[in-house]
Amino acid sequence: MYTIRTEKGGGQATVVDLRCDTVSNPCAEMRRAMAEAEVGDDFYGEDPTVNEIQRQAAQLFKTEDALFVPSGRMGNLIAVIIHCRKKGSEVLLGDESHMYFYEQRSMTQMAGMLPRPVRTLKDGRLDLQDLESKIQHGNPDVQLICLENTHNRMGGRVLPLSYMKEVRDIADRYGLKVHLDGARLINAAVSLGVETAEIVKYCDSVALCLSKGLGAPAGSLLGGTSEFVAEAWEIRKILGGGMCQSGVLAAPGLVALKHAQKYLTLDHQNAKIFAKAVQELGSPLCLVDPAIVDTNIVLLSLPGRLMGEDLCEQLSSVTPEEQENGRGVVVKGHAISPRHVRLVWHRDLSAQDTQRALEKLKYVLGKYSNEAA
């Protein structure tokens, strides 16, 4: 939470930024860690802080090795390149997945692979019947299945362990690899109440983002076998991801991992409190089901005349009436479709911020109801 000066009247407005968990700022402990980080040239594998976060990541995943990369997109792309050995290979992934929706250009242009969409169910799972139908009949071009846990566009939904095993069994049946886009993987582990490795064990590789729910300023971790990580090291250089004294980026990541359980638990609690309160408002303009809020993401469904972009605009505006009453609050959300607004909780947001966001939403919905009346 922070404040901005409003355009009219010169007053102050409190900002509650719920667009994404990437908007959080590094905490004081992270900034100290960056300033004091012991560094070396990671291009030669000599940065002790990077080596430490890679060691901790491998321990977290229970994989043979891990690699620190600049971003989650790069981690996912590296995995696709390694698992798909020839250009034109098909990658099976959800039609609502982050890798299909936002990363397919890098997959096609940089790796020369063909993303083949599979129907995504409302809880983030792939339709297994649709998945298997696309790999039957001995199609040699299909090489890889990609999963996403938690699932971003489906509202932070968590894939059950039993489902992860079902996908693993299908992959083994047809000789395919499984990569996990685990940008918010620890959110999933916290929600399930299991060790992170209990999710990863069904996959051949995994990418975890440090700059989303974990709150670090940059970086991701890619885990797999020693052979996989050795090859990933080379591909990272080819893609321009080789870094030198990158311990200054790895250091806040170590802080983020240390406090992950505590902060993610609070984020989940705040998101669920908000969802329950929105449901209790009983507005036909804005619906949410608290029962499907698994983690730190809330999807607002808009079945009536109020559209996603309009709601976001109203939430982020401070009216003269609000300024006069000293209630200037700007709430930033993200319209992921005309009928859905995504709100994401993160470590910079408190219970008080959650209440501010709720009051602002109530105020906006009340305005629309009054205008309709």
Image (spheres, rainbow, N blue to C red):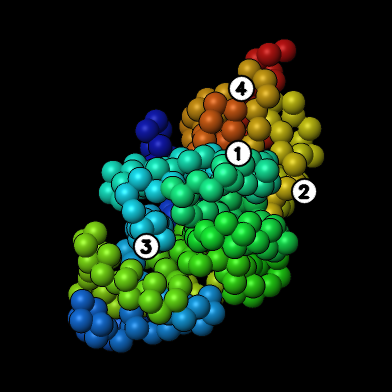
Q: Confirm whether residue 89 shows in the render.
A: yes
Which of pointers 1 and 3 lies earlier in the amino acid sequence? 3
Residue at position x 33%, y 76% from top? 230
Q: Amino acid at mark 3?
A: Ile
| Mark toward the viewer: 4 or 1 | 1
Residue pointed to by mark 2: 291
Q: Is residue 149 above or below residue 117?
A: below
**Label 2: few (<14), some or many (≥20) within 10 Å?**
few
Q: Is residue 260 above or below residue 16?
A: below
Residues under labels 4 and 1: Cα distance?
28 Å
| Mark toward the viewer: 1 or 2 | 1
Residues under labels 1 and 3: Cα distance?
25 Å
Q: Position of residue 88 (x, y in %)?
A: 35, 45
Which of pointers 4 and 1 lies earlier in the amino acid sequence? 1
Q: Amino acid at mark 2?
A: Ala
Taking 236 as reference, is 265 left or right? right
Residue at position x 46%, y 49% from top? 140
